[in-house]
Image (spheres, coloured by chain):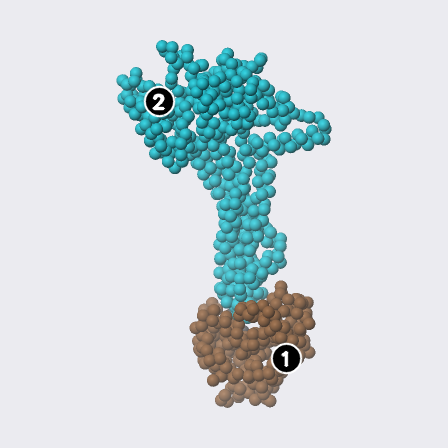
Amino acid sequence: MALIELRNVSKIYFLGGEEIRALDNVSLDIEAGEFVSIIGPSGSGKSTLMHIVGCLDSPTHGTIRLDGVEIQGASSRELARIRNRKIGFVFQFFNLLPKLNVLQNVELPLIYSGVPAAERRRRAMDALKLVGLENRVRHRPMQISGGQQQRVAIARALVNDPRIIFADEPTGNLDSQTGETILELFRDLSRQGRTIVLVTHDPEIAAMTPRRIEIRDGRVAPQVNPKLAGLDRFPAAQAAGANTPV
Amino acid sequence: MNLLNAILVGFKEIWAHKFRSLLTMLGIILGVSSLVGMSALVKGMENGMREALVAVGGVERVRIEQADIPAEQAHLADQAPGITMNDVYALKHNATLTRLITPEMRLRNVTITRGGRHATPFIFMGTWPSALEMNEHEIQYGRMFNEIDDESARSVCVIGTEVRDALFGSPEELGYDYNPVGQQVNIQNQVFTIVGMFKYYESEQDRRRRLAEQARLQVAAMTSTNSAGGASRDRGRGGRGRASWVFRVKNNTVYIPLNTMWLRFRTAAGTNNTPDPRLTGLAIKVADVDVLEPAIEQAHKALLRVHNGVEDFSFETQENWAENIASAIRNARMSGGIIAAIALLVGGIGIMNIMLASITERIREIGIRKAIGATGTAIFIQILVESVVIAIIGGLAGLVTSFGLVHVLTSISPTDNAPEITFLSCAVAFSFSVGVGILAGLIPAFKAARLDPIQALRYE
Ligand SMILES: Nc1ncnc2c1ncn2[C@@H]1O[C@H](COP(=O)(O)OP(=O)(O)OP(=O)(O)O)[C@@H](O)[C@H]1O
Ligand SMILES: [Mg+2]
């Protein structure tokens, strides 16, 4: 049984009578320990997919199993608990709380899972050591660089030892060199056996991951050989590929 | 997220917006301080009124006076005995709920002279020594006359301070408090010896003011070495209403033994050369206010028997007065309460307003918190706690302010009764402010708790 199982998942928005299929009948499995990238052009539904799998949003149709548990129809309290214990998010805009210092930001998920203060501190420090920021704990997010902020966000995502880490364009707001160090961090985490789902629109980044899932107009595009990644820039190749079975 | 954490976050949030929080708290501060201040004023008023009531003997004291015979008994008029010592003895034996009985024989328009000076007491009466307790008198110099004085109809008297002031000079006049005990005075041209003098009666408020004045004068005297006599007493002329009148009457009292009154001043009035035995009235004190009604009933029965069924007497209680006080207090409380409630309501609306603004400002933060696992309940509690913390700080500040407010009120209108801040009013005001904080926080907290995490995260 896969860690993540999506079956016929659709997300439909209704805007002024018009139907927008942000996700259209998506089925896919992600195994524990996989390092997957989700790639596709802007507006293709990558974030929507990540939010639904990450229990931030609920699908219009379809079923989702996360770690063996069906999550559609779960109460918002249960979803919050799953987000807290099993999922770590890393966002493009870091999403740290500006009024809290680095350590407090990393401690936050532990506060919501009721971990006592001393252990909270210890685990937050461990997570910060992992991302190499143990000497910046008293700084506010505004007092450190973008790359450092993203590492704090990764430490926050890791602190509760989640089953999956979702990263939505984690390098989208960083220069390429800093982005490279962040990606290196993800590769390290992957080598340690963590399941990572990386959302990106950059084929070069996607090319680094062992598996790529391509999304177009809310649908999963047929699997493409990573070596031929460049081909999907050509409409003809894409049209031809669409007929090949998964 | 436990409560302590929520409170800490609340404090941080308030500290981060100090000025805004202060403005928000202002409503609560005003509400709490007006509530406490109002109730302090009312309490002061009540104290003044009750003081006067106690000074005339309290609610337990009931007067029995001669009254017109009811129309249906008019034919029995010649059998009406009036109020006599027989009534006193009858009550003593049969009115078990009555604790104290004092006969009163009054004389009006009495002039007391000494040397070139004279006094006309408001109350001049012959009575028993128990009148001291009955009418809440206290002796300052000498003693009350006793049973032996009464038995042998000695020409002794106990006087009030204003009578002393008129005959011998007031402390302001003399520069010291004159002790008249042992002096002789002429009452209606009969010589009496003063055996005692009552203390000076005044309202608590007057006393405080006088002491303050005294202290001021002493300081003035120390600095200028120009002794300015004793502290001046307010003769009640400055005061207003029934309360200060009560104290004035009390200070203008002269008591003599009942038998002395009867023999010395009633002889001429009686028929067949026996003095008129009728009393002006009786005062009785019941054992307890709770049994006032049955006690009066009992006394009524006992008197009817002595009076051969002729109802030529009436009971006069202070209950009306007590009721007037109670209703005045109720009204004052009500209007004060309404004002304070409106202030608190406005304060609550202010808190709600600011909390709504605050959650709108923090939609993204709430989204982030939710994304990393905060439940709706945790967010709800966080916002609610913040609102309550504002209310609590405002409430405490309001309590502090109310002490200042009461101070200001006292100095603005010193002739009113001294306001008294009660613990109860503080407790009520504080719990109201906390309640307002909770109510004001509910809607914003609910809104924040229900925010959709995705929309909150996308919010710019
Ligand atoms: N709340 C919404 N209401 C209506 N349509 C929405 C809503 N949220 C997303 N969509 C639509 O769903 C589609 C997928 O959006 P999504 O954010 O998943 O794209 P994306 O692949 O993450 O794009 P990007 O790379 O720009 O982040 C878009 O066409 C978008 O307009
Ligand atoms: Mg996106």
| B178 displayed left or right of A4 | right
User: In this rendering, is residue A160 above or below B209?
Assistant: below
Disc 2 marks which amino acid?
Asn
For mark 2, name the chain: B
For mark 1, name the chain: A
Q: In this view of the protein, which residue sits in the foreground, B299 or A83?
A: B299
Q: In this view of the protein, which residue sits in the foreground, B148 or A152?
A: B148
Residue A135: x and y in percent read 68, 72
Point out the residue furthest to the right here: B224
User: Residue shown at 43%/73% (left/top)?
Assistant: A73
Could you say which chain is coloured cyan in the image?
B
Q: Is the residue under label 1 in contact with that under label 2 (CB below 8 Å)?
A: no
Labels in figure, total: 2
- Choose top left, top right, bottom left or bottom right for residue B85: top left
Which label is found at residue A185?
Answer: 1
User: Residue shown at 47%/67% (left/top)?
Assistant: A16
Q: In this view of the protein, which residue sits in the foreground, B460 or B123?
A: B123
| A239 displayed left or right of B301 | right
